[in-house]
Image (tube, rainbow, N blue to C red):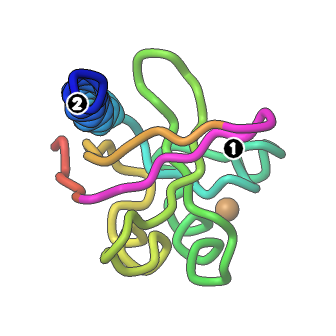
Amino acid sequence: MKTTKLFLVLAVAALTLVGSLAAQEKAMKEATIKGEIIDSKCYLTGMMGGKGEDHKDCAIACMKGGLPVAILEEKTGKVYVVVPAKGQKGANEALVQYAAETVTLKGMFIEKGGTKLFAYNSVESAK
Ligand SMILES: [Cu+2]
């Protein structure tokens, strides 16, 4: 009887801990990133300059053509391919209007095997 009670107490404590860790992990992963909306291929190859106002028309054409949209983080110079978070429409479709512009994305970083992604939940022009 005593053992059963102890087990129950431990089980409840463990579940509470797992629950709070999951909540903490979720909170930690929510992030903001500010930078220029680029098309990943042109930026990585340096084609047509690959970024900035001079590359805007090319970036729009590339994004419409399906090259993965990415964000060039302003403060670090790191590039993250942008994908939609659950419930968002395709990143190329949603972000082409911001090509070569600085925006703030909210969402989360995803990183594995040397590839860095940012799953966006919302976009705001930083102009
Ligand atoms: Cu381009």
Residue 126 placement (x, y as % from top left):
18, 42
Name which residue lies at 62% across and 66% down: 58
Give the crowd class for mark 1: few <14, some 14-19, many >=20 residues within 10 Å. some
Q: Earlier in the sequence, mark 2 or mark 1?
A: 2
The residue that appears at 21% across and 34% down in the rendered structure is: 12
Vertical order, 75 against 111 (above or below):
above
Q: Is residue 33 visible?
A: no
Q: Is residue 22 visible?
A: yes
Q: Amino acid at mark 1?
A: Gly
Density class for disc 2 (Cα within 10 Å; few <14, some 14-19, many ≥20) is: few
Under mark 2, the amino acid is: Met
Name the one closer to the observer, 74 or 13. 13
Circle count: 2
Whole-angstrom CA distance, mark 2 to mark 1, is 74 Å
Residue interval drawn in magenta: 112-121
Query: Where's the N terminus, which quadrant?
Result: top left
Secondary structure mostly taken by the magenta-highlighted segment of the chain: strand
The picture quadrant for ligand 1 comes to bottom right
User: Which one is in front, 12 or 109?
Assistant: 12
Q: Which residue is mark 1?
A: 49
Q: Position of residue 123 (x, y in %)?
A: 24, 56
Residue located beneath label 2 in the image: 1
- Is label 2 in a helix, a strand or a loop? loop
Q: Indicate left or right for 44 with 24 as reference.
A: right
Q: Position of residue 39 (x, y in %)?
A: 61, 58
Is 6 above or below relative to 35?
A: above
Badge 1 element:
helix
Which residue: 43% across, 67% down? Answer: 84
